[in-house]
Amino acid sequence: MTADDNEPVTRPPAPGRRDILEAAATAFTRGGYTATTIDDIAREMGATKGRVYHYYRAKADVFLDIVTTGMQELIDGVQPIAGNTGLDPATRLWRMAHHHAGLMMTRNSFQRVAMRAVEMRRLGEAPAQQQALETVVAMRDRYEQLFADVIDEGRQAGVFRDVDSRLATKPLLGALNWISLWYDPQRGDYNTRQRVADEYADFILGGLRRSPR
Amino acid sequence: MTADDNEPVTRPPAPGRRDILEAAATAFTRGGYTATTIDDIAREMGATKGRVYHYYRAKADVFLDIVTTGMQELIDGVQPIAGNTGLDPATRLWRMAHHHAGLMMTRNSFQRVAMRAVEMRRLGEAPAQQQALETVVAMRDRYEQLFADVIDEGRQAGVFRDVDSRLATKPLLGALNWISLWYDPQRGDYNTRQRVADEYADFILGGLRRSPR
DNA sequence: AGCAGAACATACTCGCCGGTATGTCGTCAA
DNA sequence: TTGACGACATACCGGCGAGTATGTTCTGCT
């Protein structure tokens, strides 16, 4: 019901980096990773390369910082809901989905970039960055497990259908993550975002709930 | 029930182009558009640039050919189901989703590339290619409308919840398209693919069906 | 006042990659 | 038999963009 969430919980990045991250997120959103130039990022915030390279050693580092920030925002928001054993599994899952949907819209550029990272296999040659990518994938796995656990609870309680909980997270999170692709952060006010998040949470709960008969 | 679909309906491309499309699809799947080199594509099929440029004038043309092929495969498979008025809306939607899910797995590379194309805004400078991209987006829109129409039917028939049919296609197709990102075409036989497609179709139908009470 | 270092901007290098120009080998028709 | 053309391979060019090297200005500290 009352859902004015989506406030920053994560530690704010160094003041100089904040602008870079924001600019880079929107730049990467436009053209993808390789297509986006460091100069693009700099121009996005009315600066030059020097500013970017003053805070980051490589393009991949900027990218990874965006991704981990986005992932962390997801975890920070959803983890508390998942762990709230005071609520029944269905309600918890509904709120988890609702919150996730909200972040896909309000933090669109960050989430869109984060989404892309997980589907990436390589990120340049540096093994350090390669390892960082796998760290991100590990975060995503743990995040998926949050949903899988709640689904299992609901299944054992008899509210949800008899599904493979790990497989069931796929259509669930797929539907939610997809929002970042079609939602235009320019248009849409608080109410429309709320309507969309409601519809998604309802859709997902319906998809898992045990059939009437 | 019986669902041995996913056979080629589209006109086969010129014999020389076929290999290129296949190689390029897997290459693009690995690294994305800009990150993939023409040499990558050539090496993928044990050839050199010359062979690619003999059949295509530019990198973007290869990409667009893959995308339109993928989109056409979707339309060719789903359109007949959507138009089969002999079946009730729920059954039709179930089969549409099931078929779509199947293509995401069997034709993974093509569909994954096609998926990426729609979220692209620009594709180089050439306005001809830019227009081609918008054609692809138009195909996707028409495709979405196939689902929206069936949803509307089911809604008026009282089987589906009272949703905005156009908005409802978003979580639906989002969940389905997402398959191309996590499904590994190497692993998995016919049976597992069938199980996944079943689960997705069930999930989607549940998400739209009117609640028991 | 003066100096150290942060916070950038500017100028440059250098490898990679899309595209082109040119060569080579077959094949088929007259 | 030859010569025209398809089907490629090879050699090359030019630009773009990541990263670097080198300024320049501002700030805080002593």
Image (spheres, coloured by chain):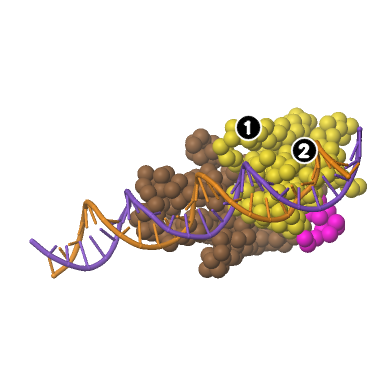
Chain colours: A brown, B yellow, C purple, D orange
The amino acid sitting under disc 1 is Ala
The residue that label 2 is drawn on is B72
Query: Cα distance, mark 1 to mark 2?
Result: 20 Å
Residue receiving disc 1: B128
Residue at (45% x, 46% y) in the render: A40
> Of the residues shown, which amino acid type is indicated by label 2?
Gln
Q: Image check: A156 left or right of C10?
A: right
Does label 1 or label 2 sit earlier along the sequence? 2
- Which of B72 and A6 lies nearest the eye of the viewer? B72
Pinpoint residue A73: horizontal percent, then vertical percent.
Answer: 50, 56
> Label 2: chain?
B
The picture places residue B88, in percent across and down from the top left corner, at 84, 35
Q: For residue A194, which quarter of the picture?
A: top right
Left/right of residue A211 with respect to residue A176 in the rendered view: right
- Residue occupying image coordinates x 70% and y 45%: B53
* Residue at image coords 80%, 60%: B188
Q: How far across and how far down the image is residue B149, in percent? A: 74, 31
Name the side, left or right, on which B191 lies relative to A51: right
Q: Are marks 1 and 2 in contact (CB under 8 Å)?
A: no
Q: Quadrant of the C terminus of chain B?
A: top right
Q: Which stretch is magenta? A: B186-199
Q: Report helix, strand or loop for mark 1.
A: helix
**Could you tell me if residue A121 is visible in this image?**
yes
Rendering quarter of residue A160 = bottom right
Residue closest to the eye, B36 or A132: B36
For disc 2, the neighbor class at 10 Å (few under 14, some 14 to 19, many from 20) is some
As for residue A75 lying within the magenta part, the answer is no
Q: Residue at x 51, y 48 (%)?
A: A36
